[in-house]
Amino acid sequence: MKKRKRRIPCGTMDMYKTFFASSDEEKLAELCWKELIINECLGLPPDFVANYRNDRSRDSLLGLHYFPAIEDDNTGKTAHEDPSCFTILYQDEVRGLEVHKDDQWIPIAPSKDKLIVNIGDVIQVLSNNRFKSATHRVVRPREANRYSCTFFYNVQGDKWVEPLPQFTKQIGESPKYRGFLFGEYMQLRIKNMTHPPDRPEDLIHITHYSISN
Ligand SMILES: O=C(O)CCC(=O)C(=O)O
Ligand SMILES: [Fe+2]
């Protein structure tokens, strides 16, 4: 059996530094959340996130990924949606990130000075499906080591997540999800990885909380 190269070369650190050098990670997330997502997309008051995440500001998760070049396998990450509010992502020049849209996988070109922001499941639920959690995957090009950083902007585990009145009652729409604790959903998603079900269709997605009208 071929031995897998697992050692992370020193160069990786440069990429992680690039990711963090630009700004304080929490400021970066706040900027996206307040200015970009709330003001421009969701159309909610500018202080919404401060109120929604009232008591804590650092419920985030950082992923540092290394996809080693393996001859017989170029799978990076299979298709999925992030359980977060949103995810800020940086991939190196090797590329590989793809987003699913209109029945097609669209490659996302890497750029040294650009970060990618993916909507996550929490926003999909809060907005009652107005904003779709990005379905994405990683297909690593053959013979290339790939590195990426992901910053998952979450809410605290005991936060109750359900469609907001702005996207339901106030516009005469019925909720498409029942409410749940964010921590409970995270546990189910982690269990997907630690105890994968025999059948892929039994993996837990946000649809676990869907209300069929
Ligand atoms: O490596 C990437 O570009 C994406 C990783 C990812 O989708 C994830 O960690 O959820
Ligand atoms: Fe992801």
Image (tube, rainbow, N blue to C red):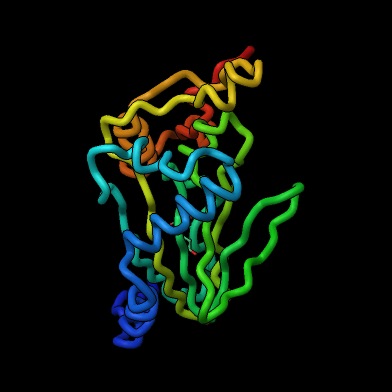
From the top left corner, tell me how far across and down residue 98 is, in percent. 61, 61
Above or below, comparing residue 81 to residue 127 in the picture: below
Front one among 11 and 161: 161
Q: Is residue 183 left or right of residue 100?
A: left
The residue at 52%/22% (across/down) is 165
Using the rendered image of the protein, determine whether residue 137 is visible from the camera's viewpoint: yes
From the top left corner, tell me how far across and down residue 58 is, in percent. 25, 51
Q: Quadrant of the N terminus?
A: bottom left
Q: Is residue 47 left or right of residue 127?
A: left
Q: Is residue 60 left or right of residue 100?
A: left
From the top left corner, tell me how far across and down residue 191 is, in percent. 33, 37
From the top left corner, tell me how far across and down residue 152 is, in percent. 38, 53
- Residue at the farthest top position: 213
- Residue at the farthest left position: 55
The residue at 47%/57% (across/down) is 32
Using the rendered image of the protein, determine whether residue 80 is visible from the camera's viewpoint: no
Front one among 109 and 140: 109
Above or below, comparing residue 54 to residue 6 in the picture: above
